Image: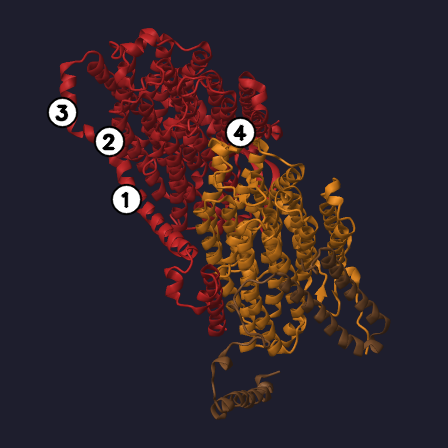
Amino acid sequence: MSLPTLDFSLILPELVVLITALLVLIADLLWPRAASRGREQAPAVLALAGLILAGLLTLLAGEWSGATLQGMLVADALARYLNLVVLLAAALGLLLSWSYLPHFSTQRSEYYALYLLAVAGMLFLGKSIELITLFVSLEILSIALYVLTGFHRGQLAGGEAALKYFLLGAFSSGFLLYGAALFYAATGATRLADIAAQNAGGFYMLAGLALFLVGLGFKLAVAPFHMWAPDAYQGAPTPVTAFMSVGTKAAALVALFRVVQAAGSVPVGVWATALAFLSLLTMTLGNLAALRQSSLKRMLAYSSIAHAGYLLVGVVAGTAAGFDAVLFYLFAYAFMNIGAFAIASLLERPGFYAVQDAGIHAADGLFGRRPWLAVAMAMFMLSLAGIPPLAGFFGKLYLFAAAVESGWAWLAVAGVLNSVISAYYYLRVVVGMFMAEPSASAHLRLPLPASATLAVALTALGTLLFGLLATPWFQGISR
Amino acid sequence: MTSADYLPILILILIAAPFAGIAILLPSVLGPKNPNRMKQEAIESGMIPFADARRRFPVQYYMVAVLFIIFDIEVIFLFPWAVSLNQLKIFGLIEMGVFLGILLIGYLYVWKKGAFEWE
Amino acid sequence: MLNYSWLILLFPAAGAVINAFWGRRLGRRGVAVVANLAVLAALIMALIMAAGVRSLPAAAHGRYELTLWQWIGVGDLQVDLALLIDPLSVVMALVVTGVGFIIHLYAATYMKLDDEHHPLDARRYARFFVYLNFFILMMLTLVLANNFLQLYVGWEGVGLASYLLIGFWFHKPSAAEAGKKAFIVNRIGDFGLALAIMWLFFLFGKSAGSLGFHDLFAQLETLSAQNSPALVGITLLLLLAATGKSAQIPLFVWLPDAMEGPSPVSALIHAATMVTAGVYMIARTHPLYEMTPASMTAVAWIGGLTALLAASIALVQTDLKRILAYSTISQLGYMFLGVGVGAYAAGIFHLTTHAFYKALLFLAAGSVMHALHGELNIDRMGGLRAKLPRTYAQFLIGAAALAGLPLLAGFWSKDEILYITYQKNMPLYIIGLFTAFLTAFYSFRAVFRAFHGAPRDHHLHDHAAEQPAGMTRPLWVLAAGALFAGLIGIPAAVGGLFGVEHSHLLEAWLHPVFANVQTPHLPAWWELGLLGASSLIALAGLGLAYARYVRQAGWALRLQRLFSPVQPLLEHKYWIDEIYMAAIVTPLRRLARFFYTFGDQTVIEGAVNGLGRVTAGAGVAVARLQSGVVGLYALSLLLGAVGLLGFFLLFG
């Protein structure tokens, strides 16, 4: 028996994240009193350092190529890009947690350890090219997120959200696993490359792919598998929501892309049409529901669902241009969405027993109170609505252009119409910030912690720069 | 693999399921029935139940159960490893070392956090 | 020289940013200085650009394109952030910055008081100028765009600024309501623009490789058939967009309500500049319209009918600013008529002169309003001539120019439109001429009712006082424009009388842009005859107003009684608001409520209420085992999975 060759250098960023997670846990054990001695933020610093190191390793790794760990993981350009998106989202979410977490929990190290585990799960998911690895990565990220969703233990909504997320997540994992089993039944292989090589058709492949779409669709919050998302996004601590709404989507999309590629024997017309309808349903449902929300965070949750629909458009297109557009949009989305959640979190009044959610009018008059914050929020909203010259506009443009080019004009038109609908609720926030007077509860001074300010500044800068420099960046992705 | 390959399994199920059913059914039909009050009591390891089964009980039970399962599975992993260790050689040793190391950290963590203390 | 043109955008942008973030620290004086300097600098830049365009080599066809930024590159399509500097855009930039600057000057004093005549606090004062500078920025982006996408950005930007400024006194429910109305009505038009751009992109985007005006127009030759259905569709969608922004039938209803905004806003945005964007866009895209005579006719008829309709409504209004609002709609109708009959230069000419006299009228009305502490009802004025002599003179000049009294600005430009309409479309000429009569009548009705006769409200009258020099002085500049701006467009027939060749300076200036458009001409004596007819019509309107409101002549009163049956119709503005309400708004609202009750209440709230009807109706054991909500969620997941599976197996 020949021993497996394991090239760990290709999963170095993931290992760094995992080891950091363990270190964060150990550090808490070794210095349990550090928390009371002005070193409360040690776990956060450690976690951030780990994320940055992982990011640097990803950037400096040179050309990644080739499968590793016996063909279970692959380190390719796609994975590398995903690494950057997820690590960016994670770092931004972590900056938000920095000042947010102390409001409701003292268990920092657990929080950050789980957070890093979720990151590791996402990173591995992006590199998975084998069904079992894929499933395990998905579970790592999911289980960590279930716990994080309910991390605010004093709050009933959080617990409820976590429980719902967990139950439905387990349910959907079942579908995914069943899909994997059917793939195996059809081809006798678990490596995606082998499955693709078999080129098997028929019932098992079809059913397998359908069930896979259910499982991944759930993680993506695609309608009708999205029902958990508004509750979970609203109930979870806002930094977690910000992070998971971007990171999970990114990782699941990459997995979806890989699986769809592997199931090449299934006629394109079938899966693409199915995805097109799911995409249409998702964006329409998300946008219509967002129209009537009274909580800023829940509105953003529905907007996040709608964006899952937009992102699917690029997968439907099925072309390289389509998926490049998805990748571009993910980066843009990381900036604008986390930025929006960041400001939502600043407008909240978190307490140990309950978070007073930021209502839809919480941002009213923000321009008078914190003008820079209002400008940043306006940028996020306009970008999410897809208004030029911001990042979101170009993301949509590339997505819809790719869809038109591969003959999905109706889907592109539906997407545009949806953006028009969405403009209404995004602009409502903007108008409130600049025109309305602050609500009665807003007379207190709005605290602005340095870490959160940094996160807002970075996201705002990203939203702007990705709009202005969209073309060079997009060309960079295409290469 | 085609579906024909699964035929033996199907046949096995077709034979096994009736067999199990018959094994349950026959005694209840043929066996003598002599009920009395004592016999009809629900029974829990020989103890006479004194309250509703659906009541709250300390969360520590869960903790112990979950931890037990984790380390139980750890042991299960050790068996195939031990069997093939002479082929895996030093590589296998290191691999298992990493695996146990990670679990050890978890173990230390729950210990320090007081998950094993009943009160 | 022209390669520094981007500065014209930088200045107002800088002004807006500085005032947005340091406005409170600067104080009101500092804010006003910054905002005014920003627009002044832009004005100087526009003048420099005008000089630059003049000195372009002949081969350039008076066109200079300055690419600032390669903005979008998708496949073959490339859209740049680029300025198109040609005679047309320079004229627009001059109007926007020139009139804009005067209005900024006026506003610096005017906005010291809020709508209830309390001092306006510094923060909101700064905010006002942020919006105003932002508006200038966006308007310049619109007129200097070299491609449709950038035009669209500017189009949305000015819409946003307009919306923010209409609702500036947001604590007044009517102002908030008006802002909302403007926003919604304009969305309809903007939707047309977006669709038109997409359609153009589908049609030509591939072959042109960009959305630039001239790149697209160069592709028009590939469309062999005149009146191709696609082109008609595109031009009609563009027209829809223009009717929204420029307040034409059927989307004009928002403009009268927009007068809820502060007077400088009414003057700048809702009279002089933004509302003319539709006219500008049609002139800019005239190669498209030249290929679709049907759409041209539609533009002309919409313009003519709007002019008539709005003028007739203006006859009976009593609110000074509303009279001006309807007159703006009516004058914009003339501009549409002009571009609709192919008299693009005349349309732009009227746009320019109108900017002067209408801004003057609005600002003078603002002065009256301040003098009377917010009163705008002309039935409660009267005799203000003695109290407000300077304002009176300014308003009179504006009204005379609006009425088209001979030799004033409005006369020349309106007459040129009528002159070409006469040759192209007789029914519209008659409508236009009749509207000119109505215009003269209602203009002087406002003058006579407000400034002549005996005061009808002595309390108001006694407290009226002339406004500070900061407000009256800038208006003299506009008054000069209202008097003399027409001189840039003296028709050749008149110029010929004085031995001046090329007397129509504006036409010569715009020639490179509209070089491909043929304007028909009649013999000089005929043209002079038409000029005479217009003059008589205007004087007749003035005379009737004088007879009715100053002399109170019996025949004029009898004439009015003759028309009394139609008065309610006019007073209620043909019930158009009510019709829209009943035919469009109410059904939409019902639909929304239906979706709300069905979507939110039945499904979502029903689910939240636990084991409600929905769950029970579904009759799923799973739902009863778990909490109602999660069960429903899982059911949705399951049904989705079954659906997906079914789809795959059916079609796979």
Which of discs 4 and 1 lies nearer the camera? The answer is 4
Marks 4 and 3: in contact by CB < 8 Å?
no
Q: Mark 4 belongs to which amino acid?
A: Gly
- Rendered-image quadrant of the C terminus of chain A: bottom right
Between disc 3 and disc 2, whose residue precedes?
Answer: 3
Extreme residue toward the right, this view: B90
Q: Is residue B84 left or right of residue C274?
A: right
Label located before the other in sequence (1 or 3): 3
Q: Taking B91 as reference, is C137 above or below it?
A: above
Residue B26 x %, y %: 50, 91
State the residue in front, C523 or A221. Answer: A221
Q: Secondary structure at mark 1?
A: helix
| Residue placed under numbered mark 2 in the picture | C572
Q: Is residue C499 left or right of residue B41?
A: left
Place residue A259 in its image quadrant: bottom right
Q: Which amino acid type corresponds to the residue marked 2 in the rendered image?
A: His
Chain B tint in image? brown
